[in-house]
Each structure stands twice: as C-alpha cells, then as structure tokens.
Image (spheres, coloured by chain):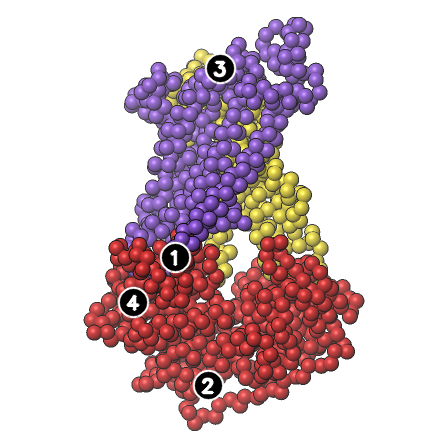
Amino acid sequence: MDTAHSHRRLTQLLSRGALTRFIIVRLAATGLLLLVLSFVVFALLHLTPGDPARNLVGVRNVTPELLQSIRDKYHLNDPFMNQYLHWLGNVLHGDFGESIRNNTTVTTLLADRVMLTLQLSSLSFALTVIVAVPLGIAAAWRTGSALDRSMSAASIVGVGAPTYAVGLLLLYVFGLWFNIFPVYGSGDGGFDRWWHLVLPAITLASGLAAMVFKLTRTAVVAELNQDYVAFAQSRGLTRRQIRSLVLRNAMIPVATSLGLVFAFLFGGTILVEVTFALQGIGSLLAGSVTFKDLPVVQAITLLTATVIALTALAVDILYYAVDPRVRKRGMQ
Amino acid sequence: MKLRTNRKPVVPIVTGIPLAIIAIFVIASRWIVPNATRQDIMTGVTSPGTAGHLFGTDQLGRDIGQLAIAGASSAVVGPIVIALGSMMIGILLGTFAGYMGGWLDLLLSKYADLLLALPTTLVALVVTGLVDGGYWVTVLVLIMLFSPTDIRMVRGSVIAQTSRPYIESAKVLGLGRLRIMFRHILPNVLPVAFSTMLLNVAFALVSMSALSFLGLGVGPGVPDWGRQLSDSRNLLDRNWGSLVLPAMLIIITAAAINLLGDWLQERYEESSVPR
Amino acid sequence: MNRGLSLNNLVVTGPAGLIVTRMDLHVEPGQTVALVGESGSGKSMTAKAMTGLLPRGVTATGSLQLDDITVDLALGPQALAGLRGQYISLLLQNPFTSLSPVHRCGEQITAALPPDLRRSKEEIRRRLDEVDLPERVARQYPFELSGGMRQRVALAASLASNPQILIGDEPTTALDVTTQREMLDLLERIQRERDMALLLITHDLGVARERADKILVMYAGRLVESGEGADVFAHAQHPYTAGLRDSDPPLEHRLVELPAIAGSVPRPWEVAVGCVFAPRCDRADDRCRNEAPELVGTTSQVACWKPIALTDASHPIQIATDVQAQNTDNDLVVIRGLSKRFSSSAPLALDNVDISIHSGEAVGIVGESGSGKTTLARCLIGLESFDSGDISWSINTPMAQRAQIVFQDPTSALNPAMTIGATLAEALRAGQRSKAEVVALLQLVGLPSEYINRRPNGLSGGEQQRVAIARAIAPRPKLLICDEPVSSLDVSVQAQILNLMNSLLKDLGIALLFITHDLAVVRQVVSRVYVMSNGRVVESGNMENVLQSPQHEYTRQLFSSVAGK
C-alpha cells in the first residue's frame, strides 16, 4: 500500500515537472515569435513610402525644427538596430509613442477603446460557442437528417458571407425596418452598451458560428465512424455513455480549433466596428491606416499578435491537459 | 466496399447557374451596360422601381443594377488571379519543401507561422493601406498572404504521397528528383489543389471587397461591389436596393464557389478511399 | 434455458445489391463455430448484422433466436439493442482502434456494468485477472499498452455483461504470430470457464481448423459448405473449399506448384444466376452456370451440383525436394555488421546483422513486427541509411539494375495517375531496356496486353501486385526483394502470386530476398532462411534444417505458434 502510494506521488510529481517544462518551452517559442513580429512591425515605419519623419509629422505644418525634434524623439538618425531597440524598450514599458491624428499618447487612445472591442469579441465568441457547438454535435449525431442538411447548407453560406454585408443587412432589417436595435454607435455604458452590441455581435458570430459548426460536425462525425463506437454499441453501452465517449474524444480537436477561431475574431471586429460605427480598436485601426497614423497601427498590430499568441499558448496547454497521448509525448 | 449509389449532380447545377451569369457579366459588361458609371446628379438618390431603375440610383444618380453588373469584373477577376497566383507559388514551393525537406522547408514553415500569427484581414489592411497601392498591388499583397496556407496544403499532400510505395519504387528505379516530384507526385496532388483553389477564390472575393469596403484597393470611380456597399451606408433610409443587391451578389457568388469547392473536395476524398 | 443462438435466413442488402444471401447458422453454448471466407465473402457483414451494427445504407432481414427471444432483423438495429452486451457481444479485429484513446482501460472495461459496480476495485481486478492482465492496467491508457494487451482489455470489456455468445471478428489477425496463439488460448479458456458460445470469424484456415468444433465456409455472400471441425477441409465436398484448402501453403513440405484457384472473388451482387463459384470452377457445367444450388445435407452441408465425393481421386500433390543451399563462392551481396538506430532513445532497429545472398538464390527473412526485417530490406535497397557496417555488392551496375523491391500493399504500389503501360515503360527505361518489352513483361506476369492502357484503380489486388512485380523485374535486377508481398492478398490469390514468383525465379535466374512473418509462405519459395528478432539474426540456415531442428529458443516458439499446421 505504502509503495503504491509513493509510486503514484512520484508519477504525479514527474508529470507536473513535465508540464512546467512543456509550458516553459512553449513560452519561449511564443516570446521568439513576438520578438520577430515586433521587428517586422517596427520596420513598417521604414517600409512605408516616404520619409519616416515626414510620415510621423502627419498633417501638421512641416518645419525643419519639427522634423528635427521628431528625428530626435524617435532616434531616426541612429543606426536601424538602435532605433529598434529604443522602440522595443519603450514598447515593453507600455509606451508606443504619440498618435499623429489625435494629440494623445497611443496608450491612452487604446485604453479608451479596448474595452468595447473586448466586450464585442467576448459576446460574439460566447454566442458562437453556445450556438454552433451544440448544433454541430446534433447535426453529426443525425447525419443526413433535415436538421443536418439545412444547417450544413446554412454554414456554407455563412462561411462565405462577408461580415460587413451580413452586418449591413441585419442593420437594415432590425435597425431601420423593424426598429428594434440601435443602428449606430457604442451606447452610453452599462446595459445600453450591451444593447448596442447585440447586432454587431450577431454579425460577427454568424461567420464564426458557421466555421465552428463545420469543425464540430466534422470532428464528431469522424469520431462516430471510429471502431470504438461500434465496439461500445456491441457491448451494450447506453446511448448516453456512448455520447460521452464520443464527445470527450471530439472535444479535443474542437477546443483546439476554437483557438484558431479567436484569431479570426479580431480580423472580423475591424469590419464590424466600421460597419456599425463602433468606437473600438478595429475601427481605430482602419482609420489609422488610411491616415497613416503609424504609431497606432504598430501598437494595434503588436497587441493583436500578442493576444493571439497567448491564446495559442493557452490552447496548447489545454490540449496537454485533455489528451493523455500529448502528455506522454511531452514527457519523453 | 463501395456502398454509395450515384446521386444526381445537384451541386454543379445549383452553383453553375449563378456562376455562369456572373461570368457573363465579367466578360460582357462593357456591352451590356456601357453607361454604368454615367452620373446624373439631377436624379440623385431614388428608391428601387423608380423610372426604369429596378434597384434605384445612388447619390450620384448612377443606376445600382448597372453598376453592380459592371462591378462584377473587379469583384471576380482579382480573386481568381489571387487564387491562381498563390496556388502556383504553393505548388512550386510546397512540392520542393515537401519532397526535399531541409532548410527550404524550415524557412517556408517559419514564414507561414509568422503570417498565420495575425488575421489576414488585419495584415491586408495594414499593408495595402500603408503602401497606398491600387487594385493590382492589393492583388499582389493578397497573393503573398494566401500563399503560406497553399504551400502548407501542398506540402502536406506531397509528404503524404512521398511515403507511399509507388514513390519509393520510383526512387529505387533511380528516377530523378524532378521527375518524381512533377511526374509522379504532382498529378496526385492537383485534384486537392484545384478544390482548395476554388475555396480560395471565394475567400479572396470576400477579402478584396472587404478592403474596398474600407476604402482600399479600388479607385474612387471604379464600379465595385464592396465600394457600393460602403456607399450604401449613407443611403439606407432612401434606397434599400443599394445595399441588398451588392450584398446578395457577394454572398451568392461566394457561397456558390464555396459549395462547388466543398463538393469537389468531397468527391475527391470519396474516390481516393481505397476499395 | 440456454440453447445457444440461431440465425435464420439472413439476407443483407447494400445499395449495390445483395451482400449476404440466405444465411443460417447455429451455435451451442460452449461450442466454437468458425465462419471462414476470403475478403468480400460477407462474413464480417454477417457479424455486423447479428449485432445491429450495419453501416448506413445496408439493411438486413431474417431472424435471430436467443433462448426464448426471437428478434426480427428487419426491424432494424434498435431491435437488437437490448440483446447487446448481455446476450451477444462482439470483439473487433483492430485493438488499436477499438478502444477510446482518451479513456483509461479500467473505465472502458467496466462501462457496461451496473453503475454501482463500475467503480469497484474488486470487480476491476477480477475482470483484469480473467484476461491475465495486472491490476495497474486499469489506470493506464490504451496507447501505453502493446497490441496483445490492448486486445485483452477489449476482450475483458466485451465480456463485462457476461454474454452468452461472443462473436470474434478476426480477433487475432492484427496480432503477431506468438501473441496470436496466446490470445486464442485465452479465448478458449474463458469460453470453457463460462460455457460461452464463440463465433469465430476468420480468413485463417489454420485457426479455424485448430480451434473450431464446426466450420462454415462462405463465398461471395453465400454459405457454400459446413461441417464438423477439421473434416470440412479434410473431406471437402465443395470445389471452392477444396481449392481454398489446397491453395493454403503447407508448412511440412514444399510443393512444386501450389494448386491455385484461377481468377478472383466476385462481388456478391455481380453474380446474377447460377452457382457463385461456377466461373472459377473446373467442374462446372451448364446447370452450375444457370441454376443456383441449395445447401443440402445433415451433419455436413454443401451447396453444389457436383460435390466432390470421398471416392474422387484428389489432385496429386507434387512434393518438391528442397533446394540445397549453394556454396558461398558466388556471393551477390554480403551484408556485414549492419546496425541502425532510429532515435537515441529507441532500441537498436538493426543490431550487428550479417547476411549474404548468392547469385540466383532465394533467401527468406522471417520475423514478427519490430524484428527489423523491413528495415534491413530498406537499408539494402538504399531507402534507409544505416549507422555502421557495410553492404558490398559483387557487381558494378547502377543500383536500379542491382536490386528492385515489391511492397506489401498492392493498392498503393502503383501511381494512380499513370497507366500500367506508362509505369512499366518507365521502369524499362530505368534499366536501359526497350519500351517495346512492355507487352512481353505483362505476359511474363500473366496479364493480358490490353492492360497497357488501364489504370491501377480498375485492377484487383492480385493484378496490381502482378504489375508491381513486372515493374520490379523490368530493369532486370540481379536481386528481387519482396517485403510481405502476399500478406494483403486472399489465400486463393496468394497461391497464384507465389507460383508466379517461383516461375520467374526459374526463368530469369535472379536472386530473391523474401521477407515475411508467415513460415508456410516462405517455405514455398526459399532455400535458405534467416530468423530475426529484436533487430538481431537469431538463427540461419537451410530452410529444411531450420524447420526440422530449430536451434534458437525464439525460432522454436515461432514454429509452435503456427496454427493448425
């Protein structure tokens, strides 16, 4: 009894150590990816046509003094690597410089807007998962049924349908025609804010839900065709038991792809925020790009990359937790 | 054991009709609607059904229907070029990377990792916006953004073929690498590549019109569905046609291409299952 | 009262037509019945119909009788749901896919028990003990176990609800020879202890002969013959049963030629009228071709218009004298001290292997999976690198003309995008031979010249393997390597290919390296043999000598595992 107990403790400790090692390795890889990306993002300043200093002046009057002060401030006369290291040092302290368009720091500008994008993203992500995953499971369970056929057809349209077109149609039907939802703007905080976000969130979720539906359905169908399902049936397991067997297996690829969906989410928020005139990070990016407000563009790009990289990391760890096969490989 | 009976080809018919109509618009719009971009400020915005304008007019008095027919080519031609271009890159680099491995493979997979670390829409927006290019620059940028996934797809299929006995037999016969890659492996990868390319056309169509919706990609006077949608935001209360027509055209075209691509892929997967 | 199981008038229909036609069978408690047939015979579909697990689009009619319960199979799979587990249970072929990869073994074994017993340690221990597994297995995941252990877990799971009849659908086919025997012994012991009926579905005549009380032979969806135990083969009445028996290579002696059945197994729905076997039967007459025979008889039954009587003269079997190994003065290739490791943590795949092959000689390598036999072949042909040792050839031609290889799986052996003619022409060019030889090459492997324009998809497995052999001999190599060339083929087709290889060796005078797990098969082809285990050559010598007086413990174990021979 004693030896069995200590044996189990040992394996627990071992696997905990393996998890730590796994996380450290993945963190290092994420850090490296972000470092390379930060370099590319910084290089945007020099890749943009025109003199970087002039680009940073924006629409202000160009005077030699102003250009000189900009050059000094951004170390534009230093060698390229030094400029980058200066910039990176500032970025790590949360300083992305000043917006060209608005005379504030990029950080304050982002702070004002980040909440709305977060609310919009989480609302549509929640909507997607709540609607698409159960529907995908149900459709896979009855392949060929009316539910499956109609949902599969809808998902093909949904995957292909552009977010802004769907958004405008919804806006027209529910906002202008039936006059149920507010048409434009971000609302005045609290419940009003959420009420304003309903249509945009549905818009964003429609494309994502189509994708998640497809992924879930494919994953569950693949599992249902496995031998272990036939074997479970043949030895008399109940429908409920078989379902839990299948879902536990199918949820592994589904959970992984939800991470991927998250990456798509931000691409979509740009269009939805512009469509519904919401004051979030996405519409800020669209505006800043057309205005060539580089510090803002750099900040948003890097921020997005960080969020996506961290999500990918979280998914990997989740993967590790739910799939014993990955655990084993991680240990070796 | 083959358990499927032959079904009627519903999908090619259902998708073929709208795609054929769009194709006619693309090829012949200059003859069908020669005056699509003619402005008529006097008329201004009218609602659908007004005096010979089935879908009404926009604030410049242009007929929405004619504009949409003329806009088909900018909506479709760029995406086709994008899908073709990125698949050509995908086949060339993916085949080499998959068969030869080594540093090229490593480099390409890192490149793909980097690009996939950000949403395509965001990168496309930032690059085309900052570069200030026109339509074809946007096409070029999207080719670069689409190619990593194509490279990955081709690379994966090539690797799957490489371990098969018939490729090993070809190696044992002492055949050259190029011959094995392009005579033996490639013909077996092409069917998947083709259906992926179709799906890419749909995705590129949505991406291109998204960029023009944001005011990038197409010049101001050029008829384009994304641009029409963007303009329609200011006309919603006066002409619903300006929204509904281009929106439906984009949705239907994208869905038809997606459906056809999905169907081809499924058919290919079924036929490649060993008996 | 337990009276076993009866299946009456089973008909299984798929979208293309009939898959199983009018099938009856009966299994008594404690009895083992073997259902024997080649691929496409409908034996697996019979098992699936009995457990209500038919694939989408396939339906069954007929009835199943268990104790006092009669189930009408036409009512669909739900009608059988209540019987599964407690009355009837199924053990599948592949232990790698029949268990859920992310659930622990203990959980899977007890899932079918009443809820209060599922967590009982005592119960799990008892169940594991029954299949000779240690208690720790309960906490392990399937991927942490060997194939044999996984199949024991699956067996324990299928027995959880104490079924009266267990159907084993090729339950040992995916296992190694030695593990196979252990598994069959275990099944037999459990069956005896539980007085359970066992329906064994197998393509392996040896297994059926050795283990079954009653054997049923199926062909193209029909039951063609049934009878008591080994008698069915010893006194085969149906020409197909006799053909199957004769084409199964014997271990005791080498035959001049294996009596093969010409052609290949038809799809059940392609047979319109007459006896299903008539097109391949040399006894067939007009009635056989026009009228389907019924199954007749009492203890032994046969469906044949012209059954073979006991008094009929059987085909004279010519036993060949084993070719004596030649002396070592004309070595074609000598392998010395070959070692290979795939990764630093893995054991040696090849451990100091010495092998030599003389010109024109047929050499066998026998071993189970993981023995290193395939790795050795791949090193020899240059598809794999090795860490140390050397391979020295006595000839100085380009590699393509030294050695060629034929692989196991015929379906992926040929490029699906190329015609047979193009494939062969390319191989000829690689050996600097003329494209004009394509037709001669096809003839050499027994295929008609029209096949030049066909693509691999339209060919049967046996035909595909013939083309693969033709491609390999096209550059006229001095050595032909065959890696399990007949393991994916049906017994009747296997005999054709083995005969073809023997005649090619004689006509072309090339050397052969034949790699296989199957002792009886290698016996029919080679004169000298190496036995491999865990990357090492444990025994080598004259085929006959090794068979008669195996020196190494592993060789003896391997020989004693061969079923029914």
Splitting the image into 4 quarters, where does residue C478 fall? bottom right
Per the image, the residue denoted by label 4 is C163
- Tell me the colour chain A is drawn in: purple
Q: Amino acid at mark 1?
A: Ala
The answer for how far apart the CA atoms under marks 4 and 3 are is: 71 Å
Label 4 marks which chain's residue? C
Task: Answer with left or right where residue B70 lies relative to residue B235.
Answer: right
Q: Position of residue C419 (x, y in %)?
A: 61, 61
Which circle's residue, 4 or 2, is located before the other in the chain?
4
The answer for how far apart the CA atoms under marks 1 and 2 are is: 56 Å
Q: Amino acid at mark 3?
A: Thr
Which quadrant does the N terminus of chain C fall into? bottom left
Instruction: Specify whether disc 3 shares its chain with disc 1.
Output: no
Splitting the image into 4 quarters, where does residue C462 fall? bottom right
Q: Amino acid at mark 2?
A: Arg
User: At x 51% / y 78%, what residue is drawn?
Assistant: C560
Disc number lying in front (1 or 2): 1
Q: Are marks 4 and 2 in contact (CB under 8 Å)?
A: no
Q: Amino acid at mark 4?
A: Pro
Task: Answer with left or right where residue A85 lies relative to residue A278.
Answer: right
Per the image, the residue denoted by label 2 is C283
Disc number lying in front (2 or 3): 3
User: At x 49% / y 81%, what residue is drawn?
Assistant: C565
The answer for how far apart the CA atoms under marks 2 and 3 are is: 95 Å
Q: Is residue A226 visible?
A: no
Q: Is residue C175 above or below residue B187?
A: below
**Observer-nearest of C426 and C376:** C376
Chain with colour red in the figure: C
User: At x 45% / y 26%, what residue is drawn?
Assistant: A269
Helix, strand or loop under label 3: helix
Res C138 label = 1
Per the image, the residue denoted by label 3 is A108
